[in-house]
Image (spheres, rainbow, N blue to C red):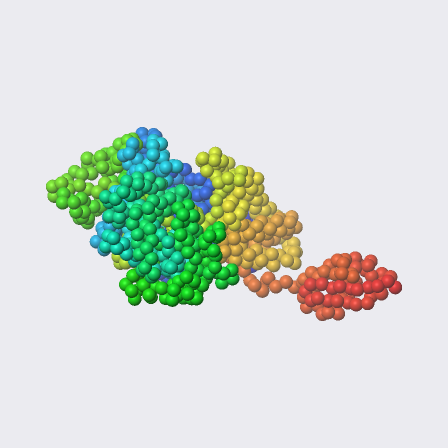
Amino acid sequence: MCLKAPPSSIYLTTMQERYNPSEIEPKWQARWEAQGADSVQNDPKKPKYYVLEMFPYPSGRIHMGHVRNYSIGDVVARFKRMQGFNVLHPMGYDAFGMPAENAAIKNKSHPKAWTLSNIDEMTEQLKRLGYSYDWRRMVATCTPAYYKWEQKFFIELFRKGLLYRKKSLVNFCETCATVLANEQVVDGLCWRCDNAVLQKTLEQWFLKITAYADELLNDLDSLKNQWPERVLTMQREWIGKSKGARIKFAVPELNESITVFTTRPDTLFGVSFMAIAPEHPLVEKLVGGTEHEQAVKAFRDKAGNINRDDRLTGNFTKEGVFTGRYAVNPINGKKVPILVGNYVLMDYGTGAVMAVPMHDQRDFEFASKYDIEKITVIKSVTEGAADPHSAKEAFVDEGVLINSGEFDGLSSEVAKDKIAAWLTAHDAGEAAITYRLRDWGISRQRYWGTPLPFIHKADGSVVPVDEAELPVVLPDDVVIDGSGGSPVAKSIAFQTGVEDRYGKGARRETDTMDTFVESSWYYLRYCSINTDDKPFDPADIAYWMPVDQYIGGIEHAVLHLLYARFFTKLLRDLGYVNLAEPFKNLLTQGMVIKDGAKMSKSKGNVVDPNYLIDRYGADTARLFCLFAAPPEKDLEWSDKGVEGAFRFLSRVWRLVHEATTGVHPDAALPADFSFQHHKTIKKVTEDLDGRFHFNTAIAAIMEYVNYLQSQASVCGGHDEFKAVLNTLILLLSPFVPHASEELWEALGHKGFATQHAWPSYDETKLVKEEITLVVQVNGKLRGDLQISLKASKDDVLIAAKANAKVQTYLSGKILVKEIYVPGKLVNLVVKDA
Ligand code: ANZ
């Protein structure tokens, strides 16, 4: 027994007979808070563990998805703390964003007031759930104390050329006179006024994430087996590294050339046309003043209005129009027509493609539609060459080159390199790599966000504000009524004094930052307690980072999780941290579903956690979430499951009561008493440690409770029986901390159960003395046998034959063979006498 029972006289000094969470939960929350139970300090003498859950957007109320996410994190935090780690477990709010502006329009309130009051309400709810957060570290990203540092980072990034301005296409609603985020464009229409959304070219701010594409890709390897494979794959695809070649096609008539990017230089002899993006800079020169000019321009305007998302996903009819010009294929001198194609993206590769109908399905369909020549240049190793006249689709696999001059007979793989080398030698191209990843457009023409700390001078230049001026505080004197344009641009206070400081005609930048910026570094800010002279202390970062366990939804697989990785690398290169990856392990928890659908307001199937806490208590809410499904899987809501969790806690309550008030101090304990005890500790420890199999850990505890209950009436009151209850409570405490503290106190302890050492188990107690063997007669199961592990073969056979049940099948028969499989079975073969 690892824990000695306290003297019986102090048992149950305070314990009530009935489990009453509404009384005990606030009591323990107040005690934890009063004693700073969850406050931590950087302590180099202790091993650290940083567990983090993705912080919520302060929309008003906690929902069951949060309860699930945060309950998982809290069990990890409490378990690690009991294992002796110095645990950092913080919480905060991702507090900028559109919903605050929408609520402001709807309720005629100010986004700041709305957000801050939601933060108060949600903090109250999180405290009611008993999560062990160090609230002193709380971060609300909408406060100048937080975003000040972001503005400083941005000034430094601007100076390094990692933040820059560029003209780019944005969704624009003329009626509302505003730029829209992709999510605000619904079926090509403005979400607010239902008018058609146009694509407009505007100057925007970008972070140069593409400069980190290779590092972001390569470092994914270091996260293997620590992050879900699915997330790694999604990030790889998002970065989208493609190897191929850039090839220069001359346009002799204009003394120009057009460069294409292709992943298949081995198909170069099969090119039958070239397609360029409608926005390609050469379009003007190609058709200006020709008979094709009008048609091409009309086509460009039409293509420009295809929604950006559709353009990226290819969700539209692929069309093209001839420019009247021809390009020359450098490898064979062949002239091919140049088309403008709506499927060619200006911001991928070079904005121009060489089309190979026989080996690219899109080009195949295009060539069929416009009756363009198809040439087979790759033959399948198994099926030979396809006939261009009868082929129904392109052959897109690699194979062996044909119709390709000196390269005939080479495999695609070899030919790719050889053709790239030929191109380099003839100054017509070279091997090249492209990424799908685009630079991160971070400017928003919206109010509720971090102001970009820059000044537009009268001469058109853009400069950072003086650092001494930071933070550039978001102005309060705005009316958010949805009337269009950026609300910040209408603030008078915001521009006051700017000209005095930065010269006549100077204006502050009025764009704010994408809210994904704030969530890209909040985990660093938590490491220090709201420092005001620096974003965080390097010693704290060195001690706490990286986050050992990050927990959140799979919906953040790319954007947030990629941006946070990127930001860590940016801050490393600015000299703030000495770290390449922020999150060592990642757990993506499943959704909470009810009646077969994700629990959400729009589905009308929401269960309010407050209701659950009022009716059953926080411990039941937590236990239900943790028991009903493994963390990665979806959790199906069940009223019965919630009832079951509550009943289980009531049973534990009664068990402690019975076991401690029992009157059998001298009873003989059952033979497997110690075995059951150590078995349970081992199972729960292993399920929690790194595997996070909370549901099976709880199931093991439930089984143990059943076992103890079955013994309580015979050995209740026995010292050893009472002592194992200590362990039971400790095992339960990460899941249901309030009930555990109350029972722990009732068992006579001072101090918190949740701060006690995690119970250990003794392997030697887990070795069973006896095993059960199956006894068969002629291969049929006829009985079983409890026998010592040390029994010899002879002992086993004698005992098997002596078994009363088995005997009935042996009587009157002749025994012909005895088979013994150690540890498993005995089979007695008989025949009629
Ligand atoms: C000729 C070719 C022949 C191609 C063939 C494919 C197969 P990934 O792998 O996704 O990088 N492409 C290049 N730039 C483009 C752009 N701006 N807009 C639309 N398509 C573009 O795709 C690279 C391939 O996509 C390139 O290789 C090019 O078509 C097309 F048998 O070139 B390929």
Q: Position of residue 642 (x, y in %)?
A: 54, 41
Left or right side of 121 for 759: right
Whether residue 321 is visible here, answered yes or no, is yes
All told, the count of numbered labels is 0
Q: To which quarter of the image does residue 269 belong?
A: bottom left
Q: Quadrant of the C terminus?
A: bottom right
Quick check: which quadrant has ligand 1?
bottom left
Whether residue 501 is visible here, answered yes or no, is no
* Residue at (41% x, 53% y) in the render: 374
Nearer to me, 522 or 580: 580
* Residue at (26% x, 48% y) in the render: 286
Nearer to me, 606 or 218: 218
Nearer to me, 492 or 393: 393
Residue ranking furthest to the right: 833
Nearer to me, 803 or 733: 803
Q: Position of residue 87 (x, y in %)?
A: 40, 54
Q: Position of residue 418 (x, y in %)?
A: 36, 66
* Residue at (56% x, 42% y) in the render: 641
Q: Position of residue 245 (x, y in %)?
A: 34, 60
* Residue at (36% x, 64% y) in the render: 419
Left or right side of 350 for 765: right
Q: Is residue 481 above or below residue 691?
A: above
Q: To which quarter of the image does residue 304 belong?
A: top left
Left or right side of 72 for 568: left
Left or right side of 769 for 170: left
Q: Quadrant of the N terminus?
A: bottom right
